């Protein structure tokens, strides 16, 4: 059980923080950047989830909101994973496992099968929920790049990178699904426009 009695500790005032194993690191280190970006991704998904849970949301919105809530929990697990060097992981610590990656792949396939085929690239938009999901997708790609940078300097579990790679695809498909739920048009790229 986690208990947070005090929110500020003053221990980070010098620009340092501690990993789960107790190691002191700079707040701008690649590992910290990686799990900080994962936290940002969860916040953007939280906006989309809140919109889906709002009164008057269309049928099917609650189901998508439940998926986003699950993803936010998985992102917390990923943050825990990234905040811990592999040698410091303790038994029972929440981490991303291969089963999370497989579940995303199955969901992507199921959602994509229910959507019309694309004949162009989708521009971010498709209503308020869809637009926030497109923003989440781009933050997810940035988190993925941050994990790649962190893995160049120190050991990062490979499931973290695979999960973020699949998650960005899943969020893209969810943005399309959200546009359909709300009856919004998906803006498509028109390459001849200038």
Image (cartoon, rainbow, N blue to C red):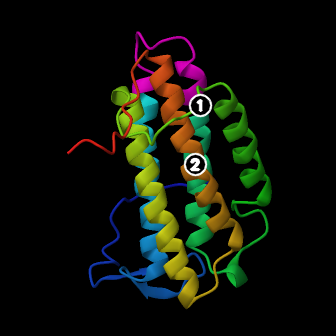
Q: Quadrant of residue 121?
A: top left
Residue assigned mark 1: 117
Q: Is 48 a magenta residue?
A: no
Could you say which is closer to the camera, residue 97 or residue 124?
Answer: 124
* Element carrying mark 1: loop
Looking at the rendered image, the quarter that the C terminus falls into is top left
Could you say which is closer to the camera, residue 7 or residue 26?
Answer: 26
Give how far apart the Cα atoms at labels 2 and 1 are: 15 Å
- Indicate the position of residue 131 as horizontal and vertical percent values: 36, 36
Could you say which is closer to the camera, residue 112 or residue 19?
Answer: 112
- In the shown orientation, is residue 145 left or right of residue 92? left
Instruction: Tell me whether circle 2 and circle 1 mark residues in contact (CB < 8 Å).
Output: no
Mark on residue 16?
none
Q: Sequence-wise, which precedes: disc 2 or disc 1?
A: 1
Determine if residue 115 is in view: yes
Q: Quadrant of residue 154?
A: bottom right
């Amino acid at each position: 059980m986690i208990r947070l009695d005090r929110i500020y500790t003053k221990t980070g005032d010098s620009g340092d923080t501690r990993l789960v194993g107790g190691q002191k690191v700079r707040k701008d280190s690649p590992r910290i950047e990686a799990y900080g970006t994962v936290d940002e991704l969860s916040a953007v998904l939280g906006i989309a989830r809140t919109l889906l849970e709002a009164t008057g949301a269309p049928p099917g919105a609650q189901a998508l909101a439940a998926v986003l809530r699950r993803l936010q929990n998985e992102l917390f697990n990923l943050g825990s994973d990234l905040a811990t060097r592999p040698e410091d992981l303790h038994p029972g610590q929440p981490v991303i496992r291969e089963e999370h990656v497989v579940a995303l792949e199955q969901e992507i396939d199921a959602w994509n099968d229910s959507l019309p085929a694309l004949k162009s690239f989708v521009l971010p938009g498709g209503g308020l929920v869809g637009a926030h999901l497109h923003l989440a997708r781009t933050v997810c790609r940035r988190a993925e790049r941050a994990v790649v940078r962190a893995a160049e300097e120190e050991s990062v579990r490979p499931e973290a990178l695979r999960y973020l790679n699949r998650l960005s695809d899943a969020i893209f498909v969810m943005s399309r699904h959200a546009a359909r739920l709300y009856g919004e048009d998906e803006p498509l790229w028109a390459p001849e426009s200038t």
